[in-house]
Amino acid sequence: MSDFITSDGMRLHYTDSGAGQPLLCLAGLTRNGLDFSFLAPHVGDLRLITLDSRGRGASDYDPDFMNYNVLRETRDVIELLDHLGLDKVCVLGTSRGGLLAMALAASHPERLTGVILNDIGPVVGAQGIARIMDYVGKPPKAKTLDAAAADMQAAMEAEFPGVPLEVWRKQAEYQYRPTEGRLELRYDPNLHKALLEQAATEATPDMWMFFKALRDLPLGVLRGANSDILSHETLEEMRRRHPGLIAAEVPDRGHVPFLDEPQSLSLIRQILDSAK
């Protein structure tokens, strides 16, 4: 099922497979629920729920780009859970979605049964931040999805060796929308302005404080072996602060694993079993 909720005046798009143990999937900064299409065929027994955060995918773009922040987006997640009548849910958060999961643990721990973080922690690597700031808000140079896929494969080969072109073709479709001989971003370009202004005003919350709120929950962390976002050092500090944390490194993946890898699927199942 594909539908919309209204949160703070914004129409937000979500999908809900409608049966089984619920797993709420929250996508990365510029991504949307389509990113979990690689995972979906492997979890047909689950109630898979995805949300396009405001300004992403099929959700409304917010006229006030400063609302593209972790705390506002966390409240949108709570609105979705209330709309679906879900008292508790396990959350799978990819990158920015993982930050939302940590914020949910800090603000609404009673709504969570467990958390899976996909290549994200309380500290984001400086190299990764620089890479993100370089591309956010910029449309691709490619004019077709096929060309975009080829560009992705060439650019990402070092971090994702051996990933076939057809996979990048799917990823291009999830990230870009063809229109009138060009490709449009599937997110509001004003996300770039939001990042710049929030950095200038130091509006980013202390994510270690939010991470601490996960201490009583089943927690799994996936790390792409070639990630520039989640470092070995940060993951080890996360282990130290959460002794029950289960981690898996996904070989031949950077930021972020597609979630259809054997290591990803195994860890997801482990946490879901603990979260029942």
Image (cartoon, rainbow, N blue to C red):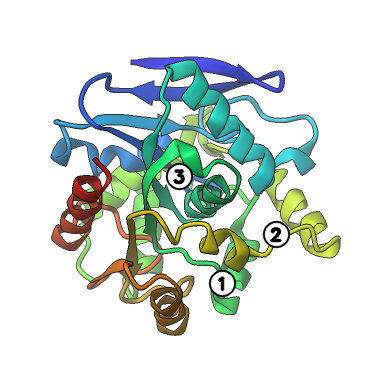
Name the image quarter holding the C terminus: top left
Q: Give coordinates of residue 160: x percent, y percent.
A: 29, 68
Report which residue position mark 3 lands on: 27
Q: Is residue 260 above or below residue 207?
A: above
Judged from this view, the residue extending furthest toward the bottom is 233
Q: Residue at x 17, y 38 (%)?
A: 43
Report which residue position mark 2 lands on: 205
Frontmost of labels 3 and 1 is 1
Relative to 263, 175 lies left or right: right
Q: Give coordinates of residue 212: x percent, y percent.
A: 53, 64
Distance CA(mark 1)–CA(mark 2): 11 Å
Which type of secondary structure does the marked residue at label 1 adopt?
Answer: loop
Q: Nearer the viewer, residue 4 or 274?
A: 274
Badge 1 density bin: few <14, some 14–19, many ≥20, Cα 10 Å: some
Report which residue position mark 1 lands on: 123
Disc 2 marks a residue whose amino acid type is Pro
Q: Nearer the viewer, residue 157 or 102?
A: 102
Distance CA(mark 3)–CA(mark 1): 18 Å
Disc 3 marks a residue whose amino acid type is Ala
